[in-house]
């Protein structure tokens, strides 16, 4: 898989999310300050709730904007045979039962799923449990991931 294409898809996804949240924050702010939203009595919290929503959406839009800056400035690394996993690694993991996962070690937006031809790539960060476990590992290394009290063993089968 071409990591440049993957990076473009991540940027497209983040740009769409940023546009959506920015618009939602503006709409929520307008609702919070609209004259019909002003409280009728001391128990009417409609405007307050709308302002909390607007602030939360604005905060999330700011986080996505920062992630966009990180990804726009990201220098993709090439990984030769014997290399260890670090930022910008595209890693293929195979579980004991044959399940195959692809993860991209990025600077932000862990959990983002990107569809590429023939696969789904999950973005992880170095701060996530899986990211911490993968850092410094190489092809053919085995890792164990515990999720909801269940341990799954994976083998690193590819690094690019």
Image (cartoon, helix red, strand yellow):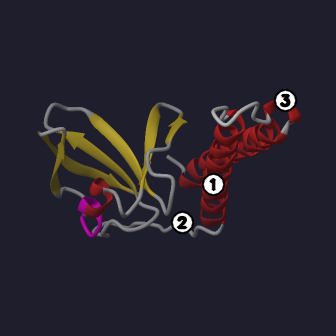
The tag on residue 7 is none
Q: Nearer the viewer, residue 122 or 140?
A: 122
Q: Give yes or no for residue 135 being in the magenta stretch.
A: yes
Near-viewer residue (136 or 26) = 26
What number of labels is visible?
3
Callout 1: few (<14), some (14-19), or many (20+) C-alpha neighbours within 10 Å? some
Using a 10 Å C-alpha cutoff, classify the residue at mark 3 as few (fewer than 14 neighbours), some (14 to 19) or many (20 or more).
few
Residue located 29% across and 36% down the image: 100
Residue 139 drawn at (x, y percent): 24, 58
Question: Does residue 112 sit above or below 124 in this rendering?
Answer: above
Q: In the picture provided, is 54 more to the left or to the right than 144?
A: right
Q: Position of residue 108 (x, y in %)?
A: 50, 59
Q: CA distance from mark 1 to mark 3?
A: 25 Å
Task: Calculate the distance from the C-alpha at mark 2 to the C-alpha at mark 1.
Answer: 28 Å
Taking the spot 37% from the left edge, 44% from the top edge, the residue there is 102
Q: Is residue 98 magenta?
A: no
The residue that label 2 is drawn on is: 76
At 44% across and 45% down in the image, what residue appears? 111
What's the magenta bit mostly, secondary-structure-wise?
A: loop
Viewer-side label of 1, 3: 3
Asked which secondary structure carries label 1, the reply is helix
Front: mark 2 or 1: 1
| Helix, strand or loop under label 2 | loop
User: Where is residue 150 drawn, in percent x and y?
Assistant: 12, 38
**Mark 3, residue position:** 36
Does any portion of residue 11 appear in the rendered image?
no
**Residue stretch rendered in magenta on the structure:** 133-137
Q: Which residue is mark 1?
A: 59
Do the numbered discs 1 and 3 sit on residues whose CB atoms are within 8 Å? no
């Amino acid at each position: 898989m071409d990591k440049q294409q993957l990076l473009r898809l991540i940027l497209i996804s983040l740009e769409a999310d940023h546009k959506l949240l920015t618009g939602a924050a503006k709409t929520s702010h307008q609702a919070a300050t609209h004259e019909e939203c002003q409280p009728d009595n001391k128990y009417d919290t409609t405007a307050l709730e709308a302002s909390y929503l607007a602030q939360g959406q604005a905060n999330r839009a700011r986080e996505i904007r920062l992630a966009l800056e990180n990804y726009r400035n990201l220098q993709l690394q090439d990984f030769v045979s014997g290399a260890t996993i670090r930022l910008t690694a595209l890693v293929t993991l195979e579980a004991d039962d044959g399940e195959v996962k692809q993860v991209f070690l990025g600077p932000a937006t862990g959990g983002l799923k990107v569809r590429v031809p023939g696969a789904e790539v999950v973005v992880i960060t170095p701060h996530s449990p899986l990211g911490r476990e993968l850092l410094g590992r190489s092809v053919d290394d085995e890792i164990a991931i515990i999720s909801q009290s269940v341990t799954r063993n994976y083998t690193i089968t590819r690094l690019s």
